[in-house]
Image: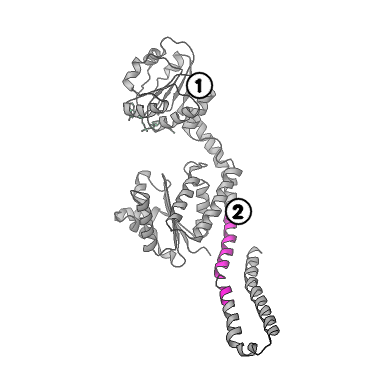
Amino acid sequence: MYSGFKIITLSHKELNLRDLGNFVVQSNDANAKGEKLKQLKEFFSLDELFYMQTCNRVVFFLYKKIGIEQIDSIDWFEQLNPSLDLPQLKWVSKNALVYIQEDVIKHLFRLMSSLESLVIGEREVFRQSREAYDQCAGWGLCGDNMRLLMRIGVVCSKEVFTDTKIGDKSVSIVSLSIQKFLEQDLPKKSRILIIGAGQTILMVSKFLLANNYKNVSVFNRTVQNADFIAQKFGKKGYKLSELQDFKEGFDCIILCTASTKIILTEELYAKLLQGDKGQKVIVDLSIPYNFDKQIINSFDVNFIGVEELREIANQNMEYRKNEMILANAIVQKYVEDFKNIYHQRLIERSFQQFPVQVKEIKEKALNVVYKKRIDALDGDSRELLNEIVNYFEKKYIALPIKSAKESILR
Ligand SMILES: NC(=O)c1ccc[n+]([C@@H]2O[C@H](COP(=O)([O-])OP(=O)(O)OC[C@H]3O[C@@H](n4cnc5c(N)ncnc54)[C@H](OP(=O)(O)O)[C@@H]3O)[C@@H](O)[C@H]2O)c1
């Protein structure tokens, strides 16, 4: 019944993420992407195509009423990216995952519910799949089949996120670090020094701003990057080398760089304290740590470190995985729902022509086959005959659709 559906996909499970770019629709803008997808749809004579790409996954949902089995992953990716060489295509044929029939429905619902994600329970994939669908529908690539799949998929994943705890308990190091930081209950005016200005610090700074911590000074190897973050707090950034001359004191230091050497030494820490004896907070998210651990022994410090946070993140991930049993049951329920609704839809489609055909038979009977005899009837008899024929027409049209639908539900 679902023989027209197919998924061709590659994800973090099969692929080194650096290579993902070879297997996505390469385009400079959205219009070019739409055009490329239209070409693919036309080349393979597909009825429908839905494309989704995230930072660790590429998924092509195909629908072709007749002949879908003739499209394999080598043909697909060769057409998608003609610069792929033979070893790459051989690799694809071995590693790309292909789902057919009922597994297509299940895979989409699992994907949208984040059960296939690297970070199980992350809600981002739900938003991404809806946006990708809207875009493809806007380009005229999708039809009734994909629309129905998405409609049920949305309801399914909403239920997974609300009726299970799969998205509870953070597994993000950054948000866990901020949770721990907030537990320290520092006053909003606290002086915060940030060391580093990469992606992690960018996320940390967003959380700080959202929680009204604005007295922030940013130090980084490249001052322009420090500026970029500092501007969010209405300040200028500093070069990392300027840290040793910083005399404004601090209440908390947050570090996260890719340096493999210690940046915050005991000596530098003592200098930054400016004789302050109060308790301080250090948050170090770098791997390896960028502060000298000896500082914890020598000074009054509350320390929040990536190692402890990782431990919590792992425990939280285990908790989320336990919720998968319930989530899988919800997905299965919606797969069954989809099957029933899809079956009904197929019947509706196949009966679409039925009313027209019945009408044609009626018209022929009245106007050709029995015309002479009907013309010989008086006005009242002709009216009664018309009423009876119309009544039969109406009942005739409704009867087979009704009984076919009932037979599915039985
Ligand atoms: N386990 C986890 O979940 C997790 C989470 C978050 C972070 N981390 C750790 O945090 C580190 C940073 O992550 P990110 O995503 O923010 O990286 P990123 O975006 O690449 O930024 C790297 C930052 O480190 C600075 N840096 C690099 N080499 C340096 C050096 N030798 N001396 C001083 N500064 C240096 C960079 O300065 P420039 O601007 O001058 O390049 C930049 O500010 C990673 O290496 C990772 O180990 C781990």
The residue depicted at 54 percent of the width and 24 percent of the height is 183
Quarter of the rendering containing residue 360: bottom right
Q: Which residue is mark 2?
A: 333
Q: Nearer the viewer, residue 259 or 384?
A: 384
Q: Horizontal placement of 140 versus 373: left or right? A: left
Q: Is residue 291 above or below residue 355?
A: above
Question: Ligand 1 closer than 8 Å to the CB at disc 2?
Answer: no
Count of picture labels: 2
Neighbour tally class for label 1: few under 14, some 14-19, many 20 plus, Cα within 10 Å: few
Please tell me whether residue 396 belongs to the stretch shown in magenta: no
Q: Position of residue 36 (x, y in %)?
A: 35, 56
Residue 188, disc: 1
Element carrying mark 1: loop
Specify start and end residues of the magenta stretch as a single range: 333-358
Q: Position of residue 296 (x, y in %)?
A: 45, 17
Q: Amino acid at mark 2?
A: Lys
